[in-house]
Image: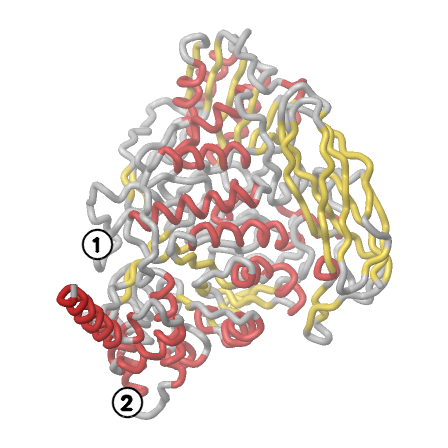
Amino acid sequence: MKKTFLIVLLALSSWNSVFAQLPVYLDNSKSIDERIEDAISRMTLREKIRVIHAQSKFSSAGVPRLGFPDFWTDDGPHGIRPNVFWDSWEQAGQTNDSCVAFPALTCLAASWNPDMAALYGKSLGEEGLYRGKDMILGPGVNIYRTPLNGRNFEYMGEDPYLASRMVAPYVQGIQQNGVAACVKHFALNNEEEYRNQVNVNVSDRALHEIYLPAFKSAVKEGGAWAIMGSYNLYKNEHNCHNASLLNDILKGEWGFDGVVLSDWGGTHDTDQAVKNGLDMEFGTGTDGLSKNKANAYDAYYLADPYLKGIVEGRYTTKELDDKVRRVLRLYYRTTMNKARPVGFLCSDDHYKAARQIAGEGIVLLQNKNNVLPINVAHAKRILVVGENAIKMMTVGGGSSSLKVQREVLPLDGLKTRLGGSITVEYERGYVGDVTGALDGVITGQNLSENRTADQLVADAVLKAKDADYVIFFGGLNKSAYQDSEGHDRKTFALPYDQGRVVEALAKVNRNLIYVNISGNAVEIPWKDKVAAIVQGWYVGSEAGTALAAVLVGDVNPSGKLPFTWSAKLKDVGAHALNTYPGTWRNDKKIIDEDYKEGIYVGYRWVDHAKTKPTFAFGHGLSYTTFRLSNLRLSAKKMTKDGHITFTVNVRNTGNRDGAEVVQLYIHDVKSTLHRPYKELKGFTKVYLKAGENKDVTISIDNEALSFYNDKVGRWTSESGEFTALVGNSSDALPLKATFTLQ
């Protein structure tokens, strides 16, 4: 017994000795800050420099000597991008780097359901973790200022409050997997054309009220671990090293403790990169510094030029140590987090999530005579028309281009759902982009077509005459100058003369359903000639399944537009005031763009300019009907440290189960500064069985009544009278109640 006891004591003594020798930076019992300080004290100057810039297209170096692994990022707005070679954009040719494509973020925003955002983030984070990624470059929350922006499909619409509510759970969902979300593009990156040269001139008020709230929510509410700077300029400084945005607002006012990444190739100056808040530099080459270098990455602005500046005494290590502390904190949150779960790739749950998000985000815009859902009991023959019914949409778009495990196309989804009971025929109708490879991803599709445009229309019209339903899948695609990174659309009109096809079909079949595949609004002057209009977005791997489910009524649509669908381009503030794309300076190097519309973006401009959109912000129909009634306030007066709760009864008055989005807008009756007529300040999605009713509550506090007073440089609320406007769309707000702020 004594011998056994002695052995145990010796073992414990040995264990305690080992534990005592464990360096602080590896000791999980210590705080992250303690571990960071210990690690940074052990790092050489060169090791510190190595961790703040890229070593390959998508990775930065770790510190092998201390046990810090390399750090891996990847694009991921709505799926994890396929792997590329170390120093090339060419795909690596791996067979295990496919993914599930989730709906693009415009569709997520259209769900008006933060629970869907949480599910989206969790699922995407699991895919990234399984693929060995430590950071997902997304989500994007830039504001929908013009429908021409080629990258709007990656973002969450025009309203800062809606985007703020959706981004926080998305970020939290990703990061619960020990994978960092990198929120982008900070900030004022509201167009793709000339994105590297645009210097944005915007009022402080518009900046804080319109363009920053979603980023602030991502940081303050979502706890984002990373932010990506944008390509454009603000106050004549590129935003990847912009002192005002990064030092003053992001790290100063908001207390951001994560890392700021440059967009790829978005760094332009070592001095600014050192001093103005950039923490990690990534890219494909930077302004010629890396040309003819054996290792281009060591020539980056935050690489050897920075090291040389420190050695020569032009810089101290103060800024460097701050950057390294932030990078190490990122490591401990991700790749050094031993409690990270195991990820999943292409799981049944992820496909289910993609279908669910799509089902909640698809928007029924118009439904004359209840032509939808398709009557599967009586229909015998359906004609599907349009290239977008057969074209893969998970590829293309720039950095969001994906290699999917599978993609169900709309035509195939309908055929599968309807089985052999209904004949589903197809006609092309028009030819758009027959490219079989986009952004490094090969579709394997052969979309070549020998028929003339006239013959394509004639063939479609001939079959449409006798069809019970005609479903036209049109809109945009993810080719250059469509919904795609790098360029904006050249026109608001539908491409490829699709309108001609739609109007020809409308003449011969009254049950014409137009499904718009896009991340943007498009001009549809023929709106009244078609029976139904569905906004189908880019909904990813399960596109065909999700769209078929809505069209036949298996899923009752509940999506609401996250942007204003203007009737014409001149109804958009940026275009009405001729501020887009801006004015070139004499040297033709910088184009200045004045955001003259200020805070009047989207529905705010509609109210201000008294335009009439094709479809309003927040609009979306259902296969059932709802009645909102009995608006009640918890109080008629609110103090600045209090809150008011609004209660409204919602009844499903139809014969189908469904969901409605109750929307609360606030009108400031009298303000010292001009304000929009109304602003979205609350919403909730409620699910009701046929005939069921529920009371729905929405609470607001002083923040909802505040505006940014640029005369004093802070958020302000003013005592006085306010009106609450409640309904189910920005143009359908029948319930009103007044209250005062004391």
User: Who's the residue at 46% across and 9% down the image?
Assistant: 422
Q: Indicate left or right for 99 with 163 as reference.
A: left
Q: Earlier in the sequence, mark 2 or mark 1?
A: 1
- Label 2: how many residues lie within 10 Å, few (<14), some (14-19) or many (20+)? few
User: Who's the residue at 27% across and 60% down the image?
Assistant: 57
| 11 is higher (above) or lower (below) than 562 | below
Q: Give the residue at mark 2.
A: 311
User: Who's the residue at 54% across and 75% down the image?
Assistant: 252
Which of the pair 603/547 is nearer the observer?
A: 547
> Residue 734 placed where, x, y %?
80, 38
Which of the pair 119/386 is nearer the observer?
A: 119
SS for tag 1?
loop
Q: Where, quadrant-wise, is the N terminus in this rendering?
A: bottom left
Q: Residue lying furthest bottom in this view? A: 313
Q: Residue lying furthest front in this view? A: 1
Q: Indicate left or right for 450 with 146 as reference.
A: left
SS for tag 2?
helix
| 504 is higher (above) or lower (below) than 392 | above
Q: Where, quadrant-wise, is the C terminus in this rendering?
A: bottom right
Q: Quadrant of residue 535?
A: top right
Q: Give the residue at mark 1.
A: 85
Q: Amino acid at mark 1?
A: Phe
User: Which mark identifies residue 181?
Assistant: none
User: Who's the residue at 21% across and 54% down the image?
Assistant: 85
| Residue 529 visible here | no
> Residue 554 placed where, x, y %?
53, 21
| Residue 488 visible here | yes
Q: Amino acid at mark 2?
A: Val
> Residue 482 placed where, x, y %?
45, 43
Which of the pair 463/89 is nearer the observer?
A: 89
> Residue 399 placed where, x, y %?
37, 51
